[in-house]
Amino acid sequence: MPYSKLTLVACALSLALSTTASAAQTPSANTSIPDGQQRYQVTAFPDRIALLGTATPHNSQTVTWRTNAQVKGAKVQISNATPSPGMHLHASEHTAEYVELESPNGKAHHHRVTVNNLQPDTLYAYRVSGEGTWSDWYQFKTPTAKFTPYTALYLGDAQNAVYSHYSRTVREAIRTAPRARVMLYAGDLVNSRSGIHDNEWGEWFAATSWMASTLNQLPAAGNHEFSSDDDNPIRYLLPNWTAHYKVAGNGPEALSDTVYFSDYQGVRYIALDSTEALQHESKAKQQAEWLEQVLANNPNRWTVVFHHHPIQSVSKGRDNPILREYWQPVYEKYNVDLVLQGHDHTYGRMGGVTQTKSKQGPIYVVSVAGPKMYLVSDNAKGTMTRTAEDTQLFQTLDFTQEEIVYRSYTATGDLYDGFTLHKSNDGEKSFTDEAPATANRVCENPSPSREDRCWNGTDLIYAKPLEQ
């Protein structure tokens, strides 16, 4: 039935009222789920499927996923990928373990299985079971046993408005590097400000989508993967992290849920837990001692360390001297190539001297992928080569035998920063700065809510245009 003239007038009036509403009247929200609505309820169908790098991903891979609590003894079927759809005919089957986790979205079983005896440089297809059903088939290629050129993606904090705003960053990243093999996260995947928020994890996996199931996921835990109680300020790791991410587990025994390394095709990726390091000095020292062992016995061509809190802070009012005391000397001693970080909700790069050879000193980067935005400190403006405020970013890392080509792109696909790190066979390095000749980006929000930040992140999902 066609609309009446009265209906059209009412619609026009409603639109006019909505577009003149003040941003100050917008409700605060961290997910796109309105109160009283449910979108990420646990069901019989497998979801939140993640492919995780083991210590040796060329011959083993870990898969995790979620179903309702009726599913026990869930399976992974895996096969060499073929053009024929009949992959199940020659698939091997592996039974998963599970951990139980209850949330307002229901009681869930989070399944995990590590498949061993895989062949390097081989395309595999796999699917996982639910309650009388299977997921779709996902494909991934195991890395080679030795160094071969490839591309990885590095993303800083998502944390707030993950499905609403962070998702576009991830999508643009895969459009830019469609054959990337690794996705590395520098922590604060979700917010978890006051405990367990399963909807945030639902949005995280919805935003990352099939990429989580086909590219090796290498996450570092941030402070928002932790929580604390009113009577105890010490933060503890939330069970959602270990339920969703069964990492390689080769770190120090007490920190094996968050500290690990994975050797992917000639690159050693090392994840550290800066949250535990900052609240327990003994754990900063423990990780430094473990890191020294991991770096002293490192046969890989390149080394990338990643953690949440920065060695050198970019944002106003932040500093992490414990990390500089215990970790930075180890990075320098073993000539780590890149240290990739998050937490500060700004962008900053330091290290590397143009065209100067050196056997010492990594390049340090801080980046942010989600919408929560802080302001750059005066100190960072004076000491860092490139900074940015109010900018969602992703990074590509192209590894070759001689070079790491680093590029940082905005969520709209524009090049914001770049450099090439050259390494000779004897380990000597030279650095070429390739940042575009554009000004450092600054906050464009005309009315920030606090003096140290540009956007809260939670003020954006229901944001309306400002009054004219």
Image: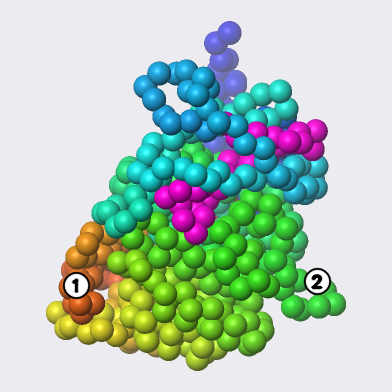
73, above or below 163, in the image: above
Q: Which residue is mark 2?
A: 229
Q: Which residues are magenta?
A: 48-77
Of 232 and 38, which appears nearest the observer?
Answer: 232
The part of the image, by quadrant, that contains residue 380 is: bottom left
302, above or below 392, in the image: below
**Residue sitting at 78 percent across and 47 percent down?**
100
**Rendering coords of residue 168 (x, y %):** 44, 47
Of 336 and 266, which appears nearest the observer?
Answer: 266
Is residue 279 part of the magenta span, yes or no? no
Q: Quadrant of the N terminus?
A: top right
Circles 1 and 2 in contact, beta carbons < 8 Å: no
**Rendering coords of residue 377 (x, y %):** 43, 82
**Residue sitting at 58 percent across and 86 percent down?**
285
The part of the image, by quadrant, that contains residue 224 is: bottom right
**Residue sitting at 37 percent across and 39 percent down?**
122
Q: Classify mark 2: residues with Cα within 10 Å, few (<14), some (14-19) or many (20+).
A: few
Q: Of helix, strand and loop, which one carries label 1?
A: loop
Q: State left or right for residue 70 relative to residue 94.
A: right
User: Given the image, on which type of amino acid does mark 1 rest?
Assistant: Asn
442, above or below 23, in the image: below
Q: State left or right for residue 366 relative to residue 1.
A: left
**Rendering coords of residue 238 (x, y %):** 71, 62
